[in-house]
Image (cartoon, rainbow, N blue to C red):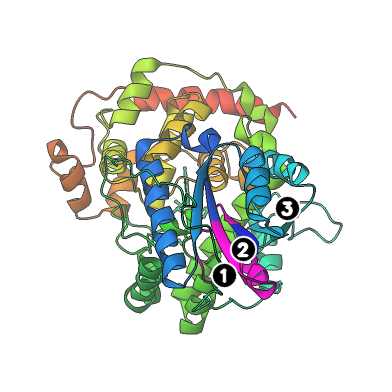
Amino acid sequence: MNLVWHRADLRTHDNPALDAALRSGPVLGLVILDPSILEATSARRRAWFQANTLALRESYTRRGTTLLVRTGKPWEVLPKLVADLGIQKVFAVQNSTPYAKFRDEQTEKALGGRIGWFEGQYIQEPGEIVKPDGGAYTVFTPFSKRWWAADWGSPLESPQRFPPVHLPADYPLGDIPQEQSDVELPAVGEEKALGALEAFLRDKLPTYHQTRDGLAGDGVSKLSYYFTLGVLSPRLAAQKALSVGGEGARKWVNELCWRDFSGDLLFHRPQMMHQTFDPRWNHLPWNDDGELFGAWLEGQTGIPVVDGCMRQLRQTGFMSNRGRMVVAQFAVKLGLLPWQKCQRAFRDLLLDGDNASNLQGWQWAGGLGVDAAPYFRVFNLSTQAQTHDPKGEWLKCWVPESGGNPEPYKDPVLDLDFARRRYLAAAERIAKSR
Ligand SMILES: Cc1cc2nc3c(=O)[nH]c(=O)nc-3n(C[C@H](O)[C@H](O)[C@H](O)COP(=O)(O)OP(=O)(O)OC[C@H]3O[C@@H](n4cnc5c(N)ncnc54)[C@H](O)[C@@H]3O)c2cc1C
């Protein structure tokens, strides 16, 4: 009997680890509730993970086998389970954040090597797309050219039935806690994710390239919830989108390339977790102003577009990509707030919070060296609202005090002209210091 250890791949479709395990015999599934990850994040994100773990257990049960759940350090939990059940081999989809690499090395050692690693979290795994000289890419466009030309392989079908496994009658399957979320969770599980993908491809993909940038987030897929936990296969989603075809499809799949680029950046530069991609930007005159940080986080700055985005995030767990760029740029460039503190708080409010995409997003929007995004681009916040919410309806919904007007609705917490000049003066000094 083999064991499939699901981590950021809470699905049975297009799952290369599960496919390989099934080829060599009966399979049990396993999810480990790892306190190092779960205790360090928010209740809403734990609830989303737990709900999708429960859905995966139901997927296993419907197919005639069992998903076990255990809590603890994987390198302690797994050897015990393997010995208890006489497991031949563990199969898992590889992950590549700094903690995941540490965890998996420890676990592989503890299992004496009886674990096989498979691709499946990305379309092209971190480290696979390299320059002709073997080096890592730091700029998106050349990375994307290689990415589009690479072989993606074909998505794997979800197995309909698993061979039965025989566990002792009283063998504990392990409880899955169901924590209360402070926001409404999206529909849970891979069947719902596949349904949401179909609806997006039918209704929104054709116009995605024209509507994707709205602050309301109406023209986008909102599938990031599922990609983050691997409830939906990005390779399957990309392939289905490309079979629809058109400019919208090309643009959308290119966003999945950004996801892979984010994973690749963090894989090659784990220091991105704490430091700016270009170390020179560590020297910006950071200003750990608690009042400003609180106003930003609570959506009370007085600047409608910033407050609308942050209130939407707090109340729904989602924010549009345009909104994410606006609030990150406000915090980093205008506020000079310590970006790590903002990024962590922001990530934990997102149901799709993902270290690689989040760090890339923050360091790109903040001009901290990712993809050579120019440091001197500082958004005009009123123009951002006017352009990406021209009727002011999104603004009216999230900041009723503004009446849909993009100008400050009260004395803003920051003098924006002063803040822009302060940032540009510091940034120019740093940019010249080669
Ligand atoms: C400051 C900042 C923080 C971000 N934090 C996260 C995060 O924690 N988790 C996360 O999944 N995405 C993050 N993003 C990227 C992006 O904003 C979201 O993936 C996207 O808004 C999710 O909505 P969607 O699924 O409707 O995307 P769609 O527009 O439908 O795009 C499809 C998919 O492509 C991927 N994608 C899209 N844009 C990006 C991007 N810029 N970078 C990486 N992948 C992308 C996502 O997986 C997304 O689901 C961040 C961006 C910024 C600027």
Residue type at mark 1?
Answer: Arg
Residue assigned mark 3? 137
* Residue in front for this viewpoint, 4 or 132: 4
CA distance for labels 1 and 2: 8 Å
Give the x, y percent position of residue 423: 50, 26
Give the x, y percent position of residue 98: 66, 39
In this orientation, does residue 8 appear? no
Classify mark 1: residues with Cα within 10 Å, few (<14), some (14-19) or many (20+): many
For image coordinates 39% across by 66% down, the residue present is 193
Residue assigned mark 2? 120
Residue type at mark 2?
Answer: Gly
Q: Is residue 96 magenta?
A: no
Q: Tell whether 355 sits left or right of 114.
A: left
Give the x, y percent position of residue 157: 54, 78
For image coordinates 43% across by 54% down, the residue present is 53
The tag earlier along the polypeptide, 3 or 2, is 2
Q: CB of mark 1 within 8 Å of CB of mark 2?
A: yes
Give the x, y percent position of residue 139: 67, 52
In this orientation, does residue 158 appear? yes
* Placement of 342 over or under 146, stated as above or below: above
Q: Is residue 9 magenta?
A: yes
* Placement of 403 over or under 229, stated as above or below: above
* The quarter of the displayed image where residue 74 is located: top right
Foreground label between 3 and 2: 2
Residue assigned mark 1? 235
Secondary structure under tag 3 reads loop
Foreground label between 1 and 2: 2
The tag earlier along the polypeptide, 1 or 2, is 2
